[in-house]
Structure formats: C-alpha cells, structure tokens
Image (cartoon, rainbow, N blue to C red):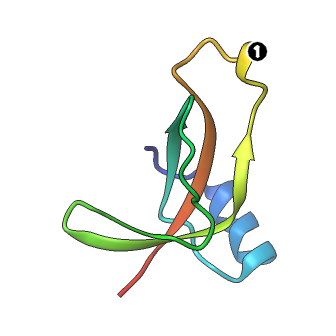
Amino acid sequence: MGQPTTEDITNSLNLYGKKIEYTLAIPKGDENIWENQEVKFFNKKYKVFGGVIEGIEDMIPLSWHKKVMVERYA
C-alpha cells in the first residue's frame, strides 16, 4: 500500500473523475477479482477503480506484481 504521487492524483482525476487515495499492491499468486470491489482497512471503506495494473511476474523480484487504485468510499 502506498500514497499516490501528485501526478497519480491528477491522472486519476483526468482519466476517471475520481481521486486516488491509496495504491494497493497485490501479491503474486492472488486470484481475487479486484475490479470495482469494496475494501476495508484503517477502519475506513475504499472502492477499487480503474483496472488492475499488472507487471510481468518473472521480471519483478518483489512478492507482488499487480496494483490497484482505491478511492475513499462512504
């Protein structure tokens, strides 16, 4: 999970009309459906928007290779 950059916020507003609050990293091997899902953390609700951004698993040495953007929800 990470804070978006100013550029990320501007791009999400221009592309989707939504303000990105966090970017969530998705672990390798995860098979959950993330598009348009509600997620909860820090006792707050967020909603995934945009598509899943996926890297080439073998090219990324970290334990994750996907990420999603979330907006504050309710």
Near-viewer residue (66 or 4): 66
Residue beneath the point at 74% across and 78% down: 16
Horizontal and vertical percent position of residue 36: 59, 73
Q: In this rendering, is residue 64 above or below 70?
A: above
Residue beneath the point at 79% across and 76% down: 14
- Quadrant of the image occupied by residue 50: bottom right
Residue topped by disc 1: 59
Residue beneath the point at 72% across and 47% down: 53
In this view, which residue lies farthest toward the bottom?
Answer: 74
Q: Quadrant of the N terminus?
A: top left
Horizontal and vertical percent position of residue 64: 55, 28
Q: In this rendering, is residue 61 above or below 29?
A: above
Horizontal and vertical percent position of residue 65: 64, 31
In this view, which residue lies farthest toward the front?
Answer: 31
Residue density around tag 1, few if under 14, some if 14–19, many if 20 or more, within 10 Å: few
Q: Quadrant of the C terminus?
A: bottom left
Near-viewer residue (33 or 6): 33
- Quadrant of the image occupied by residue 54: top right
Question: Is residue 51 found left or right of 25 in the rendered image?
Answer: right
Mark 1: which secondary structure?
Answer: helix
- Amino acid carrying label 1: it is Met
